[in-house]
Amino acid sequence: MAGPKDLDPSSSPRALLGAELRHAREKAGLSQEELGQRLFVSGSFIGQLEAGTRRMQQEFARMLDEVLETGGFFTRNCKAAAKSKYPVPYEVVSESEAPATAIRQYAPLLIPGLLQTAAYARAVNRAYDPTTPEETIDEWVTGRMERTRLLDHPTKPLLWTVLDEAALRRLTGGRAVMAEALRHIVGLARRNRVIVQVQPLSAGAHSAMQGCLKLMEYEDAPPQVHFEGVHSWRLEDDPATVAQVRFTFDLLVASALSQEKSLALIEALAEDYAHEEHP
């Protein structure tokens, strides 16, 4: 019987590695719990790897090759996954977003990736690293736009975003770029593809003032939380942390503007940007 084929790093490496892991485990006649015991991890951890909701690390891939006798397959393809078109950490985030059934997020200072336009993404990436070659910026923007294709599906995932008013008023890329970016958000919301609310500046102190957050839920795996800061990020699936972030998001929704008032504010700001660009 032919062995497993090496994976294409331009596809979803995490999902493909997960499918091959399940195949190799079942071929070895092991349950998730049994394989986990041999590797000193939980069966649920193995399940998350197979579902593509957790990233496989290089050292763990080597252990899998030894236990499942897969001839270095997982070790090779963990290296191939590093050739993803997304820069770290966005490659990891993209692979976590793809299988999600629901994504709830709060963005304090910028429009989040899944809602960005190409021009806005370019302005953000250029600001992150002013000395990066233009061709690299092009690659990053292309990767960012491919992430947004997740919203091409008419219903999945549920995307519920609370945007801080500060993010809408921060002039990023120029007035024309901001007008386009805000109209894009309104268009997605008016087509019932996303839920968008605005946390107004007038609301004062709120539950997530310390930074952005993203809660991702899955059909067959535990939810994960993504935290991101300046040159730092982490994914967590600790149940207590997930519960706290869910409560934080609920508080944000409670203090945010309604959906209709939020869209009215975004539309008004878009018109202001467009009018000031073309007096």
Image (cartoon, rainbow, N blue to C red):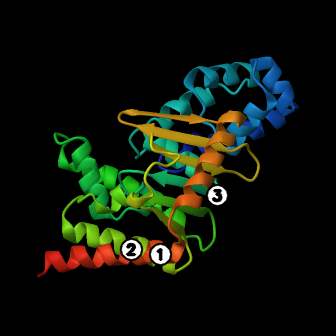
Give the foreground label among 2 and 3: 2
Going by the image, does 112 lie left or right of 45?
left
Q: Earlier in the sequence, mark 2 or mark 3?
A: 3
Residue at 36% across, 77% down: 267
Q: Quadrant of the N terminus?
A: top right
Amino acid identity at mark 2 = Leu
Residue 186 visible in the current orientation:
yes
Q: What is the spatial separation of the Cα atoms under label 1 and label 2, in whole angstroms? A: 6 Å
- SS type, badge 3: strand
Q: Earlier in the sequence, mark 1 or mark 3?
A: 3
- SS type, badge 2: helix
Give the foreground label among 1 and 3: 1
Q: What residue sits right under mark 2 in the picture?
A: 265
Q: Pointer 1 and pointer 2: residues touching (CB < 8 Å)?
A: yes
Q: Quadrant of residue 175?
A: bottom left
Disc 2 crowd rating (10 Å Cα; few below 14, some 14-19, many 20+) is: some
Amino acid identity at mark 3 = Ala
Who is closer to the viewer here, 25 or 264? 264
Vertical comparison of 119 with 265: above or below = above
Disc 3 crowd rating (10 Å Cα; few below 14, some 14-19, many 20+) is: some
Q: Quadrant of residue 2?
A: top right
Q: What residue sits right under mark 1 in the picture?
A: 261
